[in-house]
Amino acid sequence: MQLQQCPKSLGVEYGDHVILRLPNIPEFVICHLAVQRIGALSVPIFPWYRAREIAYVANDCETKVFVTLSGLIRDVQEIQSELRTVRHFMVVDNEKDRVDENIYCSAA
């Protein structure tokens, strides 16, 4: 599946919030534009946020989808049960600086 099609396929609709916990990589821009195209709101958070901060932001904005890099997933897995409104996690694989849109979409 193409990265830009994934948010819509996960049920993201107009006005929904999608967290983007990604560093400054091309996939960030692709995800941000895909979310904006639907009419949803992207909520960028710093990659160095820790579990407590991630949970606060995710619950405060009632995000439905959480997008992160495969190398940053550990903090999110620690608090997965605390994320009340997150339905799906989208993990972007950017290993070895590939720009080939390999992603894995999974239900929360």
Image (cartoon, grey):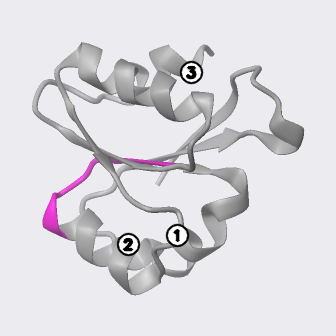
Residue at disc 1, secondary structure = helix
The residue at the point 57 percent across, 75 percent down is 75
Q: Earlier in the sequence, mark 1 or mark 3?
A: 3
Residue 51 location, x and y as percent?
A: 46, 81
Residue 54 location, x and y as percent?
A: 38, 72
The residue at the point 38 percent across, 29 percent down is 32
Q: CA distance from mark 2 to mark 3?
A: 23 Å
Residues at discs 1 and 2 in contact (Cβ within 8 Å): yes
Q: Nearer the viewer, residue 98 or 10?
A: 98
Residues drawn in magenta: 60-67
Q: Which-is-in-front pick, marks 1 and 2?
A: 2
User: Image quarter for residue 33?
Assistant: top left
Considering only vertical position in the picture, is 103 above or below 6? Answer: below
Looking at the image, the residue that sits furthest to the left is 15
Looking at the image, the residue that sits furthest to the front is 24
Query: With 36 as the anchor, is 107 left or right in this view?
Result: right
